[in-house]
Image (cartoon, rainbow, N blue to C red):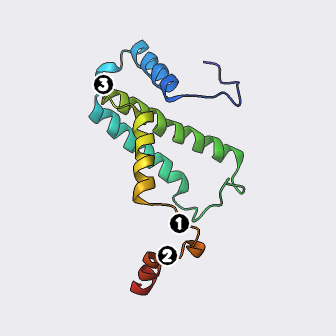
Amino acid sequence: MDMGKEKEEVSLETLSKKMDDFAKARDWEKYHSPRNLLLAMVGEVGELSEIFQWRGEVERGLPDWKEEDKVHLGEELSDVLLYLVRLSDACGVDLGKAALRKLELNAIKYPAPKPTDHCGDSSDNTKLKEDN
């Protein structure tokens, strides 16, 4: 695997193929049931959570983080992504299409404020403020 390319575009399809090849080469497919993949992913989410556990709020871009901490974060994020891609394959779900559909549903469920809504302060938000 060539890891030297900085801005290489990577598709879910490419990740899926590489994960499939990786598992086949090690005869791991028999262990990659949906349940096992989900539990492995949850474990990786736990490892990802540990990185943030005692840091409090962090700024976008992580400007105060050491480079080695950012590298570690990237590794744990990658573990979660790779298990998610593998899980979606094991379940027969086209993750890219499912994600695009979910974005469309969210746009309907959570419409952007109209230009007349100042600072997103719609009547619904005002009601929430009054209830608190």
Disc 2, SS: loop
- Name the residue carrying label 3: 31
Q: Amino acid at mark 2?
A: Ser
Q: CA distance from mark 2 to mark 1?
A: 8 Å
- Name the residue carrying label 2: 122
Q: Nearer the viewer, residue 18 or 27?
A: 18
Q: Where residue 17 sits: x, y (%)?
A: 46, 19
Q: Is residue 45 above or below residue 11?
A: below
Label 2 environment density (alpha carbons within 10 Å; few <14, some 14–19, many ≥20): few
The residue lying at 44 percent from left, 47 percent from top is: 104
The residue lying at 54 percent from left, 28 percent from top is: 11
Q: Is residue 11 left or right of residue 42?
A: right
Q: Is residue 109 left or right of residue 68?
A: left
Q: Amino acid at mark 1?
A: Pro
Which is more N-terminal, label 1 or label 2?
1
Q: Is residue 78 left or right of residue 33?
A: right
Q: Where residue 105 sits: x, y (%)?
A: 39, 50
Instruction: Please report contact status of discs 1 and 3: CB closer than 8 Å, yes or no.
Output: no
Q: Quadrant of residue 92?
A: top left
The residue mark sitting in front, 3 or 2, is: 2
Q: Quadrant of the N terminus?
A: top right
Label 1 environment density (alpha carbons within 10 Å; few <14, some 14–19, many ≥20): few
Instruction: Please report contact status of discs 3 and 2: CB closer than 8 Å, yes or no.
Output: no
The residue mark sitting in front, 1 or 3, is: 1
Which is more N-terminal, label 2 or label 3?
3
Q: Amino acid at mark 3?
A: Tyr
Disc 3, SS: helix
Q: CA distance from mark 1 to mark 3?
A: 47 Å
- Name the residue carrying label 1: 113
